[in-house]
Image: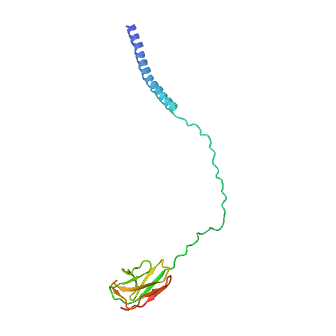
Amino acid sequence: MEKATKKAAKKAPAKKAAKKVATKAAPKKVAKKAVKTVAKKVAVKKTVAPKAPTKKAVAKKVAVKKGVAKEAPAKKAAPKTVVVATVDVGFGNMLYLRGDAPGLSWKKGVPMDCQSADSWSITMSGVKDAFEYKVLINDIHWALGENNLAKPGVANSTNSSF
């Protein structure tokens, strides 16, 4: 029996030793795997090659002439011809102008702008020659008397009666 106990005693430490080796071996395997994965990550990491230096383009200076800016020749605006009529036509009525100037006709009147209760005016451009005109109330009632004569480029006035 002694031999059996000795064998049992020898087997017991061997089993314990085997268990210790088994428990110690497991962490080593994990550690080896961890080292391998870290090594793989390091190997996969990309490196960027340094860029070659680029030359900067130098802007050339262009000489700018200083001087007086030339202005375009101003076109002379044709002088405006204005016709002013001083007539009280009553509230709600309008004054019209007919004649033989550009933009006027003897068949249909052009409405005048009311400036005050008894002052009406119209401004025309493109008039080069003197022309005849007449004022009408509501483009129906003609002013009494002869036709009026207007000079181009100036303010012409009339005191018409109806």
Q: Position of residue 92 (x, y in %)?
A: 32, 85
Q: Is residue 162 above or below residue 152?
A: below
Position in image of residue 64 (x %, y %)? 65, 60
Instruction: Name the residue located 43 percent from the left edge and 18 percent from the top edge.
Output: 17
How many discs mark residues in the rendered view?
Answer: 0
Here the colouring is rainbow
Question: Residue 3 or 136: which is nearer the viewer?
Answer: 136
Vertical arrangement, residue 130 with respect to residue 70, above or below: below
Which image quarter holds the C terminus?
bottom left
Q: Quadrant of residue 144?
A: bottom left
Quarter of the figure with the N terminus: top left
Q: Is residue 19 left or right of residue 35?
A: left
Return the residue nearer the eye: 53 or 32. Answer: 53
Find residue 102 and report its horizontal and vertical position in percent.
44, 78
Q: Quadrant of residue 90?
A: bottom left
The residue at 63%/45% (across/down) is 55
Q: In terms of image quadrants, where is residue 14?
A: top left
Comparing 93 with 129, the one in front is 129
